[in-house]
Image (cartoon, rainbow, N blue to C red):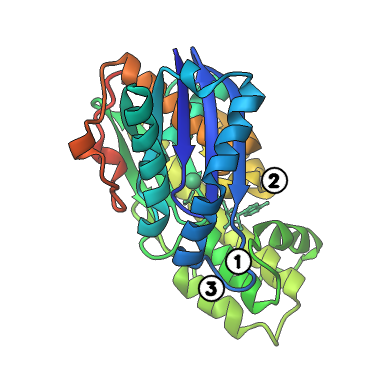
Amino acid sequence: MITLGIESTAHTLGVGIVKDGEVLANSKSMYSPEKGGIHPTEASEHHYGNAVNTLKNALSKAGIQKEDIDSVAYSQGPGIPQCLQIAGVVGRSLSQALDIPLVGVNHCISHIEIGKSETGAQDPVTLYVAGGNSQVIASSEGRYRVFGETIDIAIGNALDKIARKMGIPHPGGPEIEKMAEKGSKLIDLPYVVKGMDFSYSGMVTKVVRMLNKHSKEDLCYSFQEHAFAMLVEATERAMAHLGKKEVLITGGVAANKRLNQMMKEMAEARGGKAYKAPLKYCMDNGAMIAYTGQKMLEHGVETSLDNSTTNPNWRTEQVDIPWL
Ligand code: ATP
Ligand code: FE2
C-alpha cells in the first residue's frame, strides 16, 4: 500500500510518501517568520502557497504518479487552527479526487510511531519536546497516555523566548545550545516539577530579568541544566511508575546533545536505554503522518468526510491505538 501523508500543524508543510512501511519521500517547505514567533495567518498562507509544489516534489522523489497513491493521511490535530486547514483540505481533495481512503492522524502520536519504527524501541516512555509541545507519553491500556507535561509553555517555546530577548533569530534552540557549551557558572533558577508535570514560564522570566547581570553563555548553560534536568526527572518518574526501560526522545528539542546525554545517563543508570529519533523525523514532517496513517488504515481505522474537520486541541489519550 502506498500512503501519502500531509503535515501542517505549525510552521512546516510536509508531504511524505510511505510504501508498506518504508519512507519513499519526505518533502517539506518551512515558514519562517521574519521576526517574532509564528504568525498563524502568514503561516497558513505559506502552506497554501506551497502545497502543490511540495506535493509534486514528494511524488517525483518517490518516482510515482498521484494515481499510484492508495490512501491519504493528514495531520488532523493538535495544532494552530489556520495551519491545520491546509492538510485537511489537501487530504480531503486527494481522497475525493482519487477515490481512496482518508485518515486523520494525531501529530503527537505520529512522532512516537515513526520514532519507534526508526530506532527499534519497543515500548518506550517518549519525551516529546518541541516548540508547541512538551510531554512525557507512554502506552497504557490501548492508548498513548500523557503522564507528564508542561503546565504552561513548551520547552522549545521557552528556548525561543529567551533567544528572542537575546536578539537571536527564531528558532533559538540551536544557538542557545552553542552558547551553553561556552558557559560554566551555574546560576540558580526556579526548578518546578510537580509530580510528573513541569513549568517553564517562571524560569524564562528569571533568565530575562538577569540578562544584564550575567553573560549570555552562563545564562544559556544554567537554563539548559535546570530545564533538561526537569524533563529527565519527569521521564524517570514515569519509567519507574510504569516499569518501562526504554526512553525515546523526539520533537525539535531532541536535537540537543546535552539533553540526550542527560537522558542517556539516567536510562543507563536504571539498566535501560535512551533512543533518539533521527533528526528529520524529530522535526515536523509528512513521512510520520503517512507512516502512522498507513498503520491505522491497516488496522481498520478510517476517517469519514463528516469526521474529517480539524481538531486543534486533540489530546493524545483520546486516540484508540489498535496495535497497543
Ligand atoms: P510542535 O511539534 O510542538 O508543533 P514545532 O513544530 O514548533 O512544535 P519542532 O519543529 O519539532 O517544533 O521543533 C522546533 C523547536 O526545536 C524550536 O523551539 C527550536 O528552538 C527547538 N530546537 C531545535 N534545535 C534545537 C537544539 N539543538 N537544542 C534545543 N532546541 C532546539
Ligand atoms: Fe511536532
Does ligand 1 reach within 8 Å of label 2's beta carbon?
A: yes
CB atoms of marks 3 and 1 within 8 Å: no
Q: Secondary structure at mark 2?
A: helix
Determine whether, in the image, residue 184 is placed left or right of residue 116: right
Q: Is residue 270 above or below residue 53?
A: above
Q: Which residue is mark 2?
A: 257
The quarter of the displayed image where residue 244 is located: top left
Q: Is residue 12 above or below residue 24?
A: below
Q: What is the crowding at mark 3: few (fewer than 14 residues within 10 Å), some, or many (at least 20)?
A: many
Check disc 2 and give the amino acid type: Lys
Residue 165, image x, y percentages: 63, 78
Residue 166, image x, y percentages: 69, 77
The residue shown at (66%, 63%) is: 172
Task: Farthest residue to the bottom: give it.
Answer: 212
Residue 138, image x, y percentages: 37, 34
Whichever of callouts 3 and 1 sits on the residue coming sooner in the sequence is: 1
Total count of labels: 3
Check disc 1 and give the amino acid type: Pro
CB atoms of marks 2 and 3 within 8 Å: no
**Which of the pair 57/248 is nearer the observer?**
57
Tell me the tag on residue 33.
1
Q: What is the crowding at mark 2: few (fewer than 14 residues within 10 Å), some, or many (at least 20)?
A: few
Tell me the tag on residue 204.
3
Q: Is residue 285 visible?
A: no
Q: Is residue 144 visible?
A: yes
